[in-house]
Image (cartoon, rainbow, N blue to C red):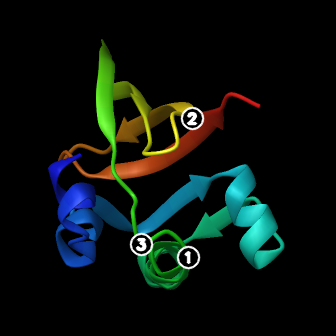
Amino acid sequence: MADWNRRDLDAILGHYTEDIRFHSPFARALIGDGLVVGRAALRAYWTEGLKRRPALRLELIDLFIGDSALALHFRDETGRRTVETMIFDAQGKVMLSTGCYRS
């Protein structure tokens, strides 16, 4: 969350594997597919997303811990709530992530 609120894309991407699989309905709207594959593609997607949302600010509501997994419940600057679930590899990097948003 702190990396996002600083808009530090390099720090954010450092949490993900090179072959990350990231699912989001916003990706579908922005790039035509709800699945972003690979750190380079994720960088391109989030670079454009950050340009479109200059006031982006995330606030953690709750955190759920699983087996090699986390689910973050947070809200953004508009008040929209999100749950993002992340699956980690053996090195502690996110290899799969999916965001679910309240409509």
The residue under the point 32% across, 60% down is 16
Where 53 falls versus 57 (above or below)?
A: below
- Amino acid bearing label 1: Arg
The residue under the point 33% across, 51% down is 57
Ranked by sequence position, the earlier of labels 1 and 2 is 1
The reply, left or right, for residue 8 in relation to residue 48 is: left
Circle 2 residue: 80
Asked where in the image residue 73 lies, by quadrant, the reply is: top left
Please give the label number shown on residue 54. Answer: 3
Q: Considering the numbered disc 2 on the image, is that residue within a helix, a strand or a loop?
A: loop
Q: Considering the numbered disc 3 on the image, is that residue within a helix, a strand or a loop?
A: loop
Asked where in the image residue 87 lies, by quadrant, the reply is: top left
Where 38 falls versus 98 (above or below)?
A: below
Where 95 falls versus 66 (above or below)?
A: below
Circle 2 packing at 10 Å, graded few (<14), some (14-19), many (20+), is: few
Circle 1 residue: 52
Q: Considering the numbered disc 1 on the image, is that residue within a helix, a strand or a loop?
A: helix
Circle 3 packing at 10 Å, graded few (<14), some (14-19), many (20+), is: few
Image coordinates of residue 14 in percent, x first then y, are 21, 67
Q: What is the distance, in whole Å, between disc 1 and disc 2 at their CAs? A: 16 Å
Question: Which quadrant: the C terminus?
Answer: top right
Q: Nearer the viewer, residue 25 or 55?
A: 55
Q: Contact, CB < 8 Å: mark 3 with mark 1?
A: yes
The reply, left or right, for residue 28 in relation to residue 48 is: right
Q: What is the distance, in whole Å, between disc 3 and disc 1 at their CAs? A: 6 Å
Evaluate whether residue 68 shows in this view: no
Q: What is the distance, in whole Å, between disc 3 and disc 2 at their CAs? A: 16 Å
- Amino acid bearing label 3: Pro
Image coordinates of residue 8 in percent, x first then y, are 20, 72
